[in-house]
């Protein structure tokens, strides 16, 4: 290390607080726009990966973004309901496989997703413990949800009522946990999956009660007239589905008219995809079909626009901060006038003194850039995990 660099280094060490403030200021000026760019890029990758794994989404006409976010992430407000027949309409077209989704219910804060086993195949989910749901009233729990709720195969989860008072007579359903899914690092980890028919039971569209024709149920019968049996108001619907009462559960109305939130469609090929998209373009068509990648691209365009404004604001603050740092150095030189004069008197040339001062500026700048580099490296290494945790929380 040269004499000038050594003197500069000793000065910076002696004035640690001032040096630390200047280094942090420069580091933040350099890091913020770069770190923001890294985070936006990683966020875009997370969003587009989920969208690319979902070919098409069908739902009621309205906000395309809300429909896609609800269908992909389960935490958004559920879209308006559509008839289950829309799932059959897609399947009957023989252009795509149809996977219904029923959203909106929760258990201990975790979203309940009513769907079919085809969804498990679409997302390539695997059971890590227990088995897949097989009968009414069973559920499989995502890895993160199972860990946070502390449940496993054989345990039970009770659905949360939509309101404080279930005036419609819909009782919370006690569901048996059939299995726990392996971690997939997607929103599926935080969800609870049930069969769509179980979701209808949770909604009160299907119920079970005692067989009133059974002589043992005579106390629950208000009147018998021919083949018609009138039950007393005291007959309570089952809030748990067991092998003993499963046969007594039935649904109100035709299955085709029961509600679902959306349909995930997996076209067989590009031609089938184009034909399916074309079938829902009529102005009076109540159903919209969306490409999640297109919807997410529009969202990311907005994010990038906001990012550009944020970078411009950071740049303006950076210029002001650099100007302040320059002022600090100039004031420091004025305060060190006697020190500089002493260096000259003991034989130091003005060029040598200027080299010492310049070495201080360069040293602080290099330390700030090095710290910014470390922060950027940490962001690139751990930012993706932090974004995933934020998106899945």
Image (cartoon, helix red, strand yellow):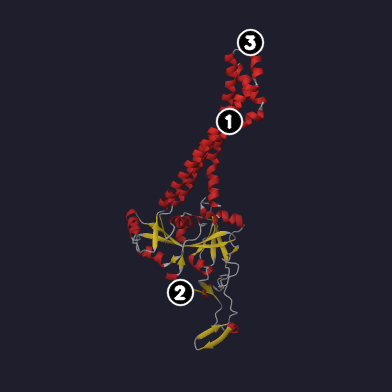
Residue at image x 47%, y 55%? 69
The residue identified by callout 3 is: 347
* Mark identifier at residue 324: 1
Which mark is nearer the camera, 1 or 2?
1
Report the Cα–Cα distance between label 1 and label 2: 73 Å
Q: Position of residue 318 (x, y in %)?
A: 54, 34
Determine crowd level at label 1: few under 14, some 14-19, many 20+ residues with C-alpha closer than 10 A.
Answer: some
Q: Is residue 235 above or below residue 338?
A: below
Report the Cα–Cα distance between label 3 and label 2: 102 Å
In the rendered structure, which disc, 3 or 1, sits on the residue that comes first in sequence?
A: 1
Q: Is residue 222 above or below residue 116?
A: below
Residues marked 3 and 2 touching at CB (< 8 Å) = no
As drawn, is 327 to the left or to the right of 91? right
Residue at image x 48%, y 42%? 309
Q: Return the residue nearer the eye: 101 or 279.
A: 279
As drawn, is 349 to the left or to the right of 74? right
Q: Is residue 196 visible?
A: yes
The residue identified by callout 2 is: 253
Which mark is nearer the camera, 3 or 2?
3
In the rendered structure, which disc, 1 or 2, sits on the residue that comes first in sequence?
A: 2
């Amino acid at each position: 290390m040269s004499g000038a660099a050594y003197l500069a280094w000793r000065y910076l060490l002696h004035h640690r607080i001032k040096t630390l403030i200047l280094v942090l200021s420069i580091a933040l000026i350099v890091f913020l726009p770069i770190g923001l760019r890294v985070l936006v890029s990683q966020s875009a990758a997370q969003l587009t990966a989920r969208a690319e794994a979902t070919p098409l989404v069908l739902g009621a006409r309205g906000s395309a973004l809300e429909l896609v976010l609800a269908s992909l992430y389960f935490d958004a407000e559920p879209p308006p309901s559509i008839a289950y027949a829309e799932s059959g309409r897609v399947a009957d077209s023989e252009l795509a496989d149809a996977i219904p989704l029923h959203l909106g219910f929760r258990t201990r804060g975790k979203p309940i997703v009513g769907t079919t086993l085809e969804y498990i195949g679409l997302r390539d989910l695997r059971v890590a413990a227990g088995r897949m749901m097989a009968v009414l009233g069973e559920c499989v729990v995502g890895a993160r949800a199972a860990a946070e709720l502390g449940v496993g195969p054989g345990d039970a989860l009770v659905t949360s009522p939509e309101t404080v008072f279930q005036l419609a007579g819909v009782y919370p359903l006690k569901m048996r946990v059939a299995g726990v899914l392996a971690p997939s690092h997607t929103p599926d980890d935080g969800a609870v999956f049930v069969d769509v028919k179980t979701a209808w039971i949770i909604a009160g569209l299907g119920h079970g009660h005692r067989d009133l024709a059974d002589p043992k149920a005579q106390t629950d019968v208000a009147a018998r007239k021919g083949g018609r049996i009138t039950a007393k108001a005291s007959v309570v619907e089952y809030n748990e589905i067991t092998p003993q009462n499963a046969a007594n559960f039935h649904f109100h109305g035709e299955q085709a008219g029961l509600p679902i939130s959306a349909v995930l469609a997996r076209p067989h090929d590009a031609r089938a995809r184009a034909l399916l998209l074309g079938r829902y373009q009529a102005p009076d068509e109540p159903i919209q079909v969306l490409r999640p990648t297109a919807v997410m691209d529009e969202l990311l365009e907005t994010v990038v626009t906001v990012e550009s404004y944020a970078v411009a604001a950071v740049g303006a603050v950076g210029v002001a901060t650099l100007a302040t740092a320059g002022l600090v150095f100039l004031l420091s030189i004025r305060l060190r006038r006697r020190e500089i004069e002493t260096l000259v008197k003991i034989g130091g040339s003005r060029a040598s003194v200027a080299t010492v001062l310049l070495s201080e500026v360069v040293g602080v700048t290099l330390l700030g850039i090095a710290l910014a580099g470390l922060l950027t490296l940490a962001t690139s290494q751990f930012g993706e995990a932090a974004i995933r945790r934020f998106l899945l929380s």
